[in-house]
Amino acid sequence: MTKNELIEVFKRAKKQRFDYVGVQIHMDGYPENELIVNKQENFDSKLNYYLATYDDELNHKYAKGIYIADAKPAHFLAEFAGLF
């Protein structure tokens, strides 16, 4: 996933009025990726945070071994169980 793809996920989520965007974070040394769920009310601020904190390939700028692996919108929290 790239920064432009992440932007498109958030744009689509806002346009189609999804309630959540799930962001899957990979961290070296952990057996499973982490899932961060962003609520609709936070889409703009969270996207701005991700854009400031991750490079164009979504590697964390300040912490080696951390990157955004994927992101998906959802209407219900239960949808994330089958998305990643």
Image (cartoon, rainbow, N blue to C red):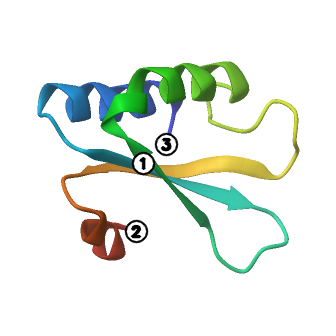
Describe residue 1's horizontal placement relative to residue 33 as left or right: left
Say whether disc 1 or disc 3 marks the residue closer to the N-terminus: 3
Which residue is at a point 44% across and 24% down the rendered structure image?
4
The amino acid type found where label 3 is placed reads Met
Q: Measured from the top left, where is residue 36 in percent x and y?
A: 53, 54
Total labels: the figure holds 3
- Residue 37 lies, with reference to residue 58, above or below; the image says below
Camera-nearest residue between 60 and 74: 74
Q: Quadrant of residue 55?
A: top right
Q: Look at label 1 and name its amino acid.
A: Ala
Q: Earlier in the sequence, mark 2 or mark 3?
A: 3
Determine whether label 1 and label 3 are within 8 Å by CB: yes
Locate residue 76 relative to residue 24 in the image: left or right. Answer: left
* Residue drawn where x is 87% and y is 42% of the image: 63
Q: Identify the residue at image location x=29%, y=75%.
A: 82
- Which residue position is annotated with label 2? 84
Tag 3 residue: 1
How packed mark 2 is, by other alpha carbons closer than 10 Å (few <14, some 14-19, many 20 or more), is some
Looking at this view, name the residue that lies furthest to the bottom: 31
> Closer to the camera, 60 or 79?
79
- Drawn side of residue 4 relative to residue 54, left or right: left
In this view, the mark in front (1 or 3): 1
Three-letter amino acid code of the residue under disc 2:
Phe
Position in image of residue 28 (x %, y %): 81, 64
- Residue bearing mark 1: 71
